[in-house]
Image (cartoon, rainbow, N blue to C red):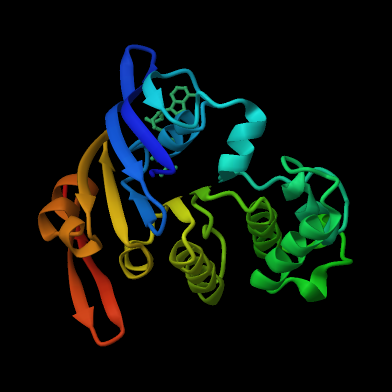
Amino acid sequence: MSLLALDQLTVTRGQCPVVDSVSLTVDPGECVGLIGPNGAGKTTLLRAALGLLPHRGRSSLATLSARDRARAAAWLPQSREIAWPVTVETLVALGRLPHDSRAGRVQARAVETALDRMELAAFRHRKATELSGGEQARVLIARALAQDAPLLLADEPVAGLDPASQIFTLQVFEALASEGHAVLVSLHDLTLAARHCTRLVLLDRGRVAADGPPLEVLTEAHLAEVFHLRGHMLETPHGPLLQPLDVLR
Ligand SMILES: Nc1ncnc2c1ncn2[C@@H]1O[C@H](COP(=O)(O)OP(=O)(O)OP(=O)(O)O)[C@@H](O)[C@H]1O
């Protein structure tokens, strides 16, 4: 059964649809990359899918109560503000809030798994507000992982991370998918998207321009039409690699 189903999802800003009749499903085992140029509607789509924005059409998550939705999907927004000077361990444990607090051992195990997965054990007693921006990003990913929801929606989670941390984060998402969870993640790095996602959804001015296996979506025609970019996807022994060449005006 799909973990997310969008049917004709539409969000209008002023007179203008910025997400326009988007229909798609995300199934267990999928790591779906949501790609598109700045302003294509990626953030708006993710927030409307969660029911955080007024919309027309239907999202299977938007109709759930807040508690049920938090059990069905973890949300990693683009903004990464950490307001309180709590320890990393305490912050990650907040991911367990939607779950039954009486199940203490299950709660603790989920927090440990999330800390281990994001390689944060050494940081556990540090104040989250005193970490670097990239370290804070990893802590917030760990909090979302501790939620242990079947679906993770993540909005540009690797922005501001160093190259190794970007790859590491996407490997964690791939592993989640291979364990039967699903991930819908917006990304700007098309090489990372091609390498680590099982499927890409390309948004262009709010509409789905392509949806399929990465190399079928990242064609030269789509790079030109949607990203205004001349470039090639090269197939290397290490996987696909985007070679951007020029901006098309
Ligand atoms: N609060 C708002 N009021 C009016 N227009 C908005 C608002 N938020 C977003 N928009 C517009 O909606 C469109 C889609 O924005 P959105 O943030 O979803 O794009 P995006 O694909 O996530 O972009 P980026 O890659 O730059 O983060 C843009 O044209 C943006 O200007």
- Give the residue drawn at x 33%, y 41%: 25
* 245 vs 195, nearest the viewer: 195
Q: Extreme top residue here?
A: 15
Q: Is residue 74 visible?
A: yes
Left or right: where does residue 104 sit relative to residue 98?
right
Q: Extreme bottom residue here?
A: 237
Q: Quadrant of ligand 1?
A: top left
Q: Is residue 168 above or below residue 63?
A: below
Left or right: where does residue 235 sit relative to residue 196?
left
Locate the N terminus and report the quarter of the image it occupies: top left
* 193 vs 97, nearest the viewer: 97
Q: Position of residue 241 (x, y in %)?
A: 27, 74
Total numbered labels placed on residues in the image:
0
* 96 vs 245, nearest the viewer: 96
Left or right: where does residue 239 sit relative to residue 101?
left
Q: Is residue 202 above or below residue 52?
A: below
- Give the residue drawn at x 67%, y 50%: 147
- Give the residue drawn at x 51%, y 26%: 51
Q: Quadrant of residue 28?
A: bottom left
Q: Position of residue 152 (x, y in %)?
A: 52, 50
Q: Position of residue 15 (x, y in %)?
A: 32, 12
